[in-house]
Image: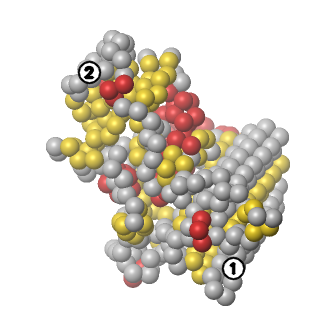
Amino acid sequence: MRKIILRDRRKIFPFNEPARELRVLNQPMWLYHRDVLARYTTEEREVDSLAEIDSQRVETLVYRDNLFFDQFFLDEFIRRARELGKACRVAFEPDDRSITAHAIYLQRGIRQEAKLLVADMWYFPYGVEPNVRPLVMDTGAHEMGYYHVPTHMSNERGDLTYQVPTKAFCSIEHWIHTVTTNVIFGVLSNGARADIEMEGLGKQIQVLWRAMLERKNVHSSSGLVQVGRDCRIDPTATIKGPTVIGDNVNIGPGSVVDVSVIGDNVNIMQGCQIQWSVVSDRCYLPFRAALFSSVLMEDSMLAQNSCLQFCSVGRNTFIGAGNTFTDFNLVSKPIRALQQDELGSTGMQVLGGCVGHNCFIGSGMVVYPARVIESDVVLLASDRRRVIDRNVYYEDSDHFAVQGGESLHQRLYPR
């Protein structure tokens, strides 16, 4: 099969990069796509529109490169499309719980046509043709609770829940979607599938047997925790699965890593808390740093006593000590975020902030929910700016001290 990639050149603010370059589960999305499709495709071509695709009568998969889809979704789509034997495209029922709860906000890639939701992924058994039919997919939503709070802090029972897909699909058009794909449709999808597998007696016996052999808690055994080569994990650290830890990782005493993805060459020092998060290659977390439902892209650092919840942080970024990214809407409504100069609902009552690439954030600041700091910003705490209650753009950066006629901080990611 050949694959045709439709380039989406829109830049995602505040990273100021196309979606394909951003990290998903510790891989650039273009590389993630390549790995997911490796078992099916033998050739690849990139185009800007369907009109550029030639008329060869060969089995063809076409998709827009800002779409996130996992191996489980793709396997199901290819299997059913081949069984159908006709040209088709991805579609969803309007009541698909994962799509309607998390994927339809602040985007246009999954859109209503007739009575279905459709997206830009097609299968053609004999080359591209104009007549296609919808192939309705089910994401297999699995409800998972993550907070139990007093009832006055939530809309109903006091439970805040995710509708986690076991076959994930999302269109990345806003920074919030980097949290959705990495957390809800990434590490929590791994957890949902593990929950379902553990309902089977065979899986229960397999994991229990490994735990007994290794003298570990069931959730910490190699049946649920995958550890790479040359790792140094202190005996007092707590690792709970399903978790994937890369090569050459250091995890210090008293640290907790719970249902997360940790990349290669990551240093997590004593007392750190990482839950439902993705920490990419070569990141550094000094003592008592905390991540909850967040993503750190590669080569970034979160300093001691800083706390990120439901946040997304770009590559090569430093966040200093004692920063707090708040995440809860005090008014019982979904948080709104800025998109193309307009506020739109995120569908989330709990949401943190976003920091772009190549940023340097000083110590001791408080960032309000859904606020963003653009790539290449240097931000220092001061009496004038210690609480971040609005978006911070490159023009607002504190680095504009000039020495020898040149800026001290180079801009790498222009809008």
Q: CA distance from mark 2 to mark 1?
A: 57 Å
Answer above or below: position of 91 versus 277.
above
Pick the front one: 208 or 259 = 259
Q: Quadrant of residue 54?
A: top left
Q: Quadrant of residue 300?
A: bottom right
Answer above or below: position of 84 versus 221.
above
**First in sequence: mark 2 or mark 1?**
2
Residue hosting label 2: 129
Label 2: few (<14), some (14–19) or many (≥20) C-alpha neighbours in 10 Å: few
Q: Position of residue 237 (x, y in %)?
A: 76, 58
In the picture, the quarter occupied by the N terminus is top left
Residue 309, numbered label: none
Pick the front one: 242 or 379 = 379
| Type of amino acid at the residue the image marks with label 2 | Glu
Residue hosting label 1: 381
Q: Residue at x 45, y 36 (%)?
A: 7
Residue 105 visible in the current orientation: yes
| Type of amino acid at the residue the image marks with label 1 | Ala
Q: Is 76 left or right of 36, judged from the image as shown?
A: left
Q: Quadrant of residue 252?
A: bottom right
Q: Residue at x 64, y 41 (%)?
A: 223
